[in-house]
Image: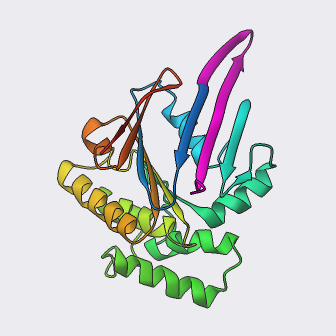
């Protein structure tokens, strides 16, 4: 089976003056279609950098990143943006919603960049907000919603362009435990419906929701644990 995302001997080296920082040191990760994979590690382990590679948000210093079998390691930022807009949906710890827009408008936003007609954008956004049980908050702005509601808007937005992969960065980090369980239940539901889920977290309990955990320490994969 061809992985949907593969990092092959990926290094990311940052240069600050004369100092070189090896954020990633030759990591190898394969994610197959339909998997639920967690990348777990402490603060400073390279999780954010790994997230950038897995989500096509950055290119490696050395090594290769494959998306659907295509080498994207040397693409321009504009080409990367086009690919990830179609293939990958992002759910962030900080929600990253635009406070001046309503929930519906936030969900519609990614579809604008893919050239979807307004009528279709409105229809799809309303459908997605119903799926995450926010049909009565469509016209509310993020500042008028709880953290859990904002995270559900963020999940709906991540699904706007029907991506194959959902990449979740500490998706329960800013939520209370009950709301966090609800968000994880919804990610499991999406996984059962065929979405590939990649979750980056420092939390051991949250990581255990995945089928497989890749442990990252000091920019290296130290072990892999499968359920």
> Range of the magenta residues?
1-24
The relative height of residue 201 versus residue 37 in the rendered view (above or below) is above
Left or right of 94? Residue 56 is right
Q: Residue furthest left?
A: 178
**Position of the N terminus by quadrant:** bottom right
Please provide percent x and percent y for residue 123. 51, 88
Locate residue 202, reporting x and y percent. Answer: 36, 34
Closer-to-camera residue (37/119):
37
Examine the rendered structure and indicate whether residue 190 appears above or below residue 23.
Answer: below
User: At x 66% / y 81%, what residue is drawn?
Assistant: 116
- Residue drawn at x 51%, y 60% is 33
Quarter the C terminus occupies: top left
Q: Is residue 93 visible?
A: no
Q: Residue at x 52, y 60 (%)?
A: 165
Which residue is pictured at 64% across the width and 63% down the height? Answer: 85
Q: Reply above or below: 188 against 43.
A: below
Residue 74: give x, y in percent of width and height.
80, 43
């Amino acid at each position: 089976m061809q992985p949907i995302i593969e990092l092959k001997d990926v290094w990311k080296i940052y240069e600050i003056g004369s100092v070189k920082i090896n954020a990633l040191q030759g990591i190898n990760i394969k994610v197959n279609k339909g998997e639920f994979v967690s990348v777990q590690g402490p603060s400073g382990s390279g999780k954010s950098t790994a997230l950038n590679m897995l989500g096509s948000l950055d290119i490696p210093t050395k090594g290769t990143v494959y998306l659907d079998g295509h080498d994207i390691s040397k693409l321009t930022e504009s080409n990367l943006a086009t690919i990830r807009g179609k293939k990958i949906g992002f759910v962030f710890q900080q929600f990253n919603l635009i406070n001046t827009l309503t929930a519906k408008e936030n969900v519609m936003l990614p579809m604008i960049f893919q050239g979807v007609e307004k009528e279709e954008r409105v229809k799809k956004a309303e459908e997605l907000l119903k799926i995450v049980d926010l049909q009565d908050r469509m016209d509310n702005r993020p500042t008028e919603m709880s953290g859990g509601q904002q995270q559900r808007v963020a999940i709906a937005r991540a699904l706007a362009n029907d991506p194959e992969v959902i990449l979740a960065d500490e998706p329960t980090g800013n939520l209370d435990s009950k709301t966090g369980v609800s968000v994880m239940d919804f990610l499991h539901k999406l996984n059962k419906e065929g979405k590939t889920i990649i979750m980056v977290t420092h939390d051991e309990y949250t990581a255990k929701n995945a089928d497989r955990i890749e442990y990252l320490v000091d920019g290296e994969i130290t072990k892999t644990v499968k359920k």
